[in-house]
Every structure is written in C-alpha cells, then in structure tokens.
Amino acid sequence: MTDITSAIVELSDIVDARYGGKALGLAELARAGFDVPAGFVIADADPGALPEGLQERYAALAASGASVAVRSSAAGEDGAESSFAGQYDSVLGVRDHDGLVAAVRRCVASTGSERASAYQADSGISGTMHLVVQEMVDARAAGVVFTADPVSARRDLAVVDAVPGLGEALVDGSTASDHFEVDRTGAITARVSPARASVSDAEVAEVVAGARRAEQLWGRPLDLEWAIDRGGRLRWLQARPITTLPGDLGAMDSVPAGDDHVYTRCNIGEMMPGALRPLTASVSGQAIEYAMQTVQVIAGFQEAYQDDRWLQLGYFSGHLFLDMTEGTALSAGILGNSLEQYCLSIAGRLVEELVPKAPASFPVRLVNTVRLSTFALTAGGAIRRLDKKLAGFAAPSAATPHELLAELDAAIELYNEATLTHVRSSSRAAVAANILEGTAVKEAVRAGRSEDDGRSLASKLMAGGSDVESAMMLAQLDDVVDRLAGDADTGGRFLDLAPGDAVTWLVGGSGATSRELADFLQRHGHRGYRELCLRDPSWGDDPDGLGTIMQAMLRARRATGRSARPARAQDDARLSRAVRTLARMARAGAAGREATKSRMVLVAHRLSRGYRLLGEQLVEQGRLPDADLVFFFDRRELPALLAAEDTSAMVAAAESRRTALPFQARLEFPDVSVGRPTPFTPRAPEGIEDGVIVGRPACSGVVEGSVRVAATVLEAQDLQPGEILVAPVTDVGWTPYFTLIAALVTDIGSSVSHGAVVAREYGLPCVVNTQGATRVLHTGDRVRVDGDRGTVTVLTG
C-alpha cells in the first residue's frame, strides 16, 4: 500500500506561496472580502495516493449541485517572476468523485508534457504539483482584467476582455472577446465589441473597481480572472502578478504644478524629442528649467530660482513638457505681447485651453518690459562671455569617479549658462517672427488681400538669413557630398563600404574631400539627432549614423545631379519700412537662435562624454554591471551610488527604468494637455475636408509629389530624392535629409521651429502644425503641399 503524501489544505489556511501562486491568490482575495467561489487545495497531488477525506471534502463542496473545476497551482506558477499560464492542464465540469480522480491524474500528468518541461527548464522552476478544486460559476459572462495594460505597459489603464459564458473561450481563442480600456477615473477610453457586448459598461466599471482594489492590496499590477453568474453576481476566480511588465513608466514623474495647468509637447518636443533617460532629464531638462525660471525672475514674475521644483517644465512618462500656464505671465506682465503671440511662438496656434492671467497694471508692465527687453537685447555680451568659457572647456575626464563627478557637477553651471543664453536669443527670434507675421497680415488685409497672403509673405521674408547655423552646416556637408559625386572612384568606394567604415576611411585620407569632412566634424561633430540627450551619440561619435546620411545624399546626387543651396532673401524694396525692419530682425533672430543652440549642444556633448566615462569607471569598481546604466540615474542619485557599500537596490531601480524606456518611447501625447499629460491613441486630425489637411504656412511655394512618412530619423533613411517628408517634428539630426526632399510637413511646430527655419533657407515649401498629418498620410500617397496657404491636399489618380 502506497504511503499517503498528499493532503487537503483549506484556502483559509494558505498564507504563503508554498502551494503555488494560484492558491495563494485565491486565499488572499477571499481574506480581503472578494467574492471567491468555495474550494480547497490538494497539496503534493499524487494520483496513486489521494489524500484522506478527499471524497467527503468533495461531496461537501458539490452539495449545492454545482460542478467543480480542477486547476493546477504548481510551485512557481502564477508567481511574481513567471506565470506558467496554460502550461498545465485544467479540467472543468467535474460532477462526481470518479471524475475528480480522473481530473487529478490528468493535471498531474501534464507536469511531464513537452511544453511544461520546456517552460520549467527555461524558468528554473520545479514541477511540484498542487491542485485547486473549486466550485464552478454558472457564468453569463467571464473574462480577465489587467490593472495595467500589458501591451503598452501603462499603469493608468486597466484592460478588460470579456466573452459570453465561461472564460475558457477567451483563453483558447475560440470566441472573439469584447475589449475595454478604462482610465484611472473609471472612464472607458477605448472599446472593441465584435458583436453585442457580453457585459454592460456598469459591469466593466465594477470589474475594474474590484481589480484596482486588489492591486492596492497587493501593491503591484495584477491579472485577475472573473465571472458574472446568471444572477449578475461578480465572482473572482484568480489573481496573479503581471509578470511581463517593464518598470513603471511614470516612476520618475515630476509633480504637476497644478491640475489646471496646460502642458504641451510643442517647442520642447522639438528640442527634446522622444523619451528621455533620467540623467538627461535631470541635466538637460533641468538646464532648460533653470533658464526659463531665470527669465521669470529677471522679468519680475518670480522671486527666485527654485532648484527643487519643476515650474516651467514637467517630466512625465519619460517625456518633457512645457508648462504654458506658467509662461502666461509674460503675456500678462509685459507690454507689446499677447496671449495669442505667446501661443503662436510655442504651439503655432491659439491654445484655447489656456486661461490668460489678469494683466498687470501699466507701471508694472512697463518696468517688467524694460527688464526683459534689456536682458534680451544684451544677449550679445552674454554670448561673448560664454565663448570665452567654452574656449577653455573640455569634456570632464578626471581619473577617479569622485573627482570626475565633482568635475561634471561644476560643468553643470556652464551648461545652465549656455542654455540661458540660448533662451535669451530664442526670445528675440520668436518675438520678431510673431510681430512680423502680425504686421504682414494686417497690411495684407488693408490692401484687400487675405490673411493667408500676409502669412505667406512673412514666411518668404524670413528666408535668406545670413550665417544660419543649420544651413551653414548642411551646406558644408553638401560640399563634401558634391566632391564625392564628382570623383567616380572615391564616391564609388564610399558607397561600397559599410556606412561607418566609409566615414572612417574618408576621414583617414589625405585628399581635399577628406580634409573637408574632417573640418565638418571639427565644426559640427557635436551635433546630431536628439542632440541634448546625454546617451545618444553625436555625428562625431557615430560614424554609422553619419555615413548612412551621407550615402543617402550621395545616391540622390548621382541620381538627380541636384545639390542643396540656400535660398536668397526676398526682395523687400516695395514693402513698408516697418515690414522691412521686422524682416531683418526676424532673420537675424533666427540666425542667433541657431548659433546659441550649437553652443548649448557643445556643452551637452562634452558632458555626455564625461558621464559615459563615469559609467566605465563605475563598472571597473563593480558598482555598475555596464556603463550604459549610468544614464538611468537621476544626477542627484549619483553621489549615493558612489558612496553606497551595496549598490544592488539602486542598480535594480536603474535597470527597471531601462526596461521601461522602449515602452515610454512608443507613447504619444496630445499637443496640449490640461493637468498631468496622459498618453493617448492617436487619431486623424479633425477638420479635414475634401482631402485637405490645414496647418500653418512656414515656407512659401507649391509642390506635388509622393509622401514619405517618417516617425523617426531612422525611418528617414528610406527617403528617395524628390519625396515629401512628413514627420512629427524635426531637429538638427534630420537636416542632411533636406537635400533630398521636395517639401516638409510636420505635425507640430511654429514659424521659428527648426524645420521651418531650414526649409526657408533652402526654399522648400513647408507646412507645420498640421496636428497629425503623420496619422492621415501614408508613404506613397501623392499630395500637393501649398506653403503659401498652409495646406496639404491629397491627390487622387
């Protein structure tokens, strides 16, 4: 006779995971007051030696006439590290003791199945089997609820999937499910119902509310199974941690300055596109925060800089946002400015959600205006002082981590100064551009023309500025490509090599083309895509990226023979003196803005090298597993990282942030949010009629052609000569591709955004602020871009 090794354990007696995660989840749900169907556990299930009293315990459970379900609760299954979901068999509808014995045999036998054995080997988990025997629910509807979206990893969304009848139809995929996404307020933000919904909105809300309560008790996101019986009673069948989630996407979020504050990705999204690492946010983001707060202090709108608060910016889900509500102090507190001008310079449109502040008294506005004007007009002196400091500034390179961190912290002050200088220069550019457009519109209307005519004229007048950094940079790189195109042997060799090898080979040469490329890298090698991100490499540090761009330019040159050359300034002799003066100021402002941006990026580039060296030193000391992880610390955490005897907890937190980054990068936000910005599912922009997308004119001209939609600069590598680039926004890293395109269309932006400035310098029709052209248009579509009217028309046929 076989010794009895298995035993019956009541759910109420289970307090830990020794009987598997499924059993523990049910026990904890029941203890917390959730309506859990009655059941028990067969511990260490063995078909050859069933526990004493099993027949009696089963009879008591089935006394109501309900059938039971037998499910695995193996050691390690449904735990915090792995789910084992579907690896072991479950048996439903058991109606007698013989059926129970057969179900136990089947479930235990499944531990040796090929799929379960492979999973056990991969996860390092034993196959010890415990079984949950539980009353079945006569379900009208059943399903699962995730308290965090397992696809996007958003903790603010709960996801409910439901089917009629038993939930097994959902698991095996035999029935299409109803799908609901519910935000933290309980609102259903998305739904998919293949037929008549199996549950009502009220039932979805009840399921989510219960799941959120369980999440709060567990202290982590959960995956729960539920069923609603024929009488409408909600029952809970399972609870387990979601094992596939990365780190919390909002773990490093700043505190919103106010629930009614208006945040935007416009403007700041061009300077700092995409999701940012914590180190970049705490260095580059804080430098911008410092500069913008300082402007508020100088203008008399703030008493002192507050280095412990995000006031002008916000950092949410890895993205930086501009707090427009704080910025309205400028329009309310100085003369000659307005809320409309402020909105246009930041968002390229009037932001209706923004509530204007009450205007200050005239004397106060006069004093503030003098302060701010003096500050802006004296930017030249600040630039000269900055240049003297930059001449003696090299990348921090101390030999020990403590010395290097002190050197980096000291360099932050220079970064703050460079950023403030850029903000001073940018304010002049934005004001001049906005006043020019306003004046041109008024004069056009007085002359009997349309407002669009005035905007078109303003965009033409802003082209042709001398010494615009982006245009000069592109022209110099274009000259290198011209030389390659004119030398069949050298150009052919450059195209035959891998992109990075091609750049290395050319720079290492001794000819004129090699010298020109070396000079380009000397002057502009610190620039690149996402150039204020401390982790992303610059062109000088990324031969592969630069080589890819140059090869695309060279192929286009060989195919078309066309090179990029800056446009000439518009002849303004017939215009009023006021418009001519404003046009010169706007062109000079754009040039100044680009020049100071280059200085700011130079400091960021050298800081990036210093932090990368710090990461390498910390790896040598055994404090970090790899150097890249240093970019996932907040700058203020680094002293503790250097001082800690045990860094494991800090390393784990940083690694969690790194796993979150790809998910953060996929998030999209509305261009304007009230309160904490919340990701959304992008939809086509509203107001499209007859296939016409309306944006803002940024550079005049009309062109027809095929669309190339590129969400990132990597996707822009596929651009073909003469295509129309449609992108969310562009920064300097996109600039070389402007030699290929026929026109530019962006989702966001204003007349002084990077894309608009460079498009004007090269005479490319440009429409900005379309509010979603990337979501309407597709690569290969044919469109007409009208840079005079600010429209993009989809062509048929």
Image (spheres, rainbow, N blue to C red):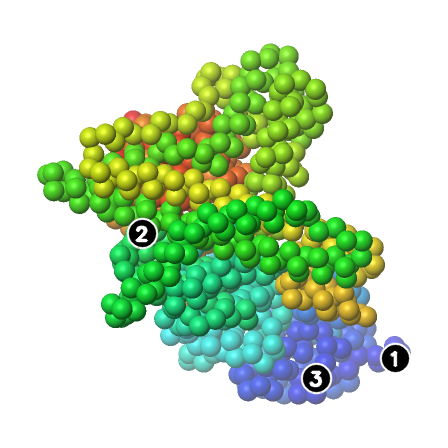
**Viewer-side residue, 719 vs 518:** 518
Circle 3 residue: 14
Regarding mark 2 in the picture, which secondary structure is present there? helix
Q: Quadrant of the N terminus?
A: bottom right
Circle nearer the N terminus (1, 2):
1
Q: Is residue 792 above or below residue 533?
A: above
- Image coords of residue 174 (percent x, y): 51, 56
Q: CA distance from mark 3 to mark 2?
A: 62 Å
> Which mark lies nearer to you, 3 or 1?
3
Res 134 seen here: no
Q: CA distance from mark 1 to mark 2?
A: 82 Å
Circle 1 residue: 3
Which residue is rendered at x = 66% and y = 59% of the image? 410
Q: CA distance from mark 3 to mark 1?
A: 24 Å
Regarding mark 1 in the picture, which secondary structure is present there? loop
> Which mark lies nearer to you, 3 or 2?
2
Circle 2 residue: 344
Contact between labelled residues 2 and 3, with CB atoms less than 8 Å apart: no
- Image coords of residue 757 (percent x, y): 40, 38
- Image coords of residue 634 (percent x, y): 63, 63
Displayed quadrant of residue 195? bottom left
Circle nearer the N terminus (3, 1):
1
Which residue is rendered at x = 69% and y = 70% of the image? 79
- Image coords of residue 465 (percent x, y): 38, 34
Query: Could you tell me the amino acid type at mark 3?
Result: Ile
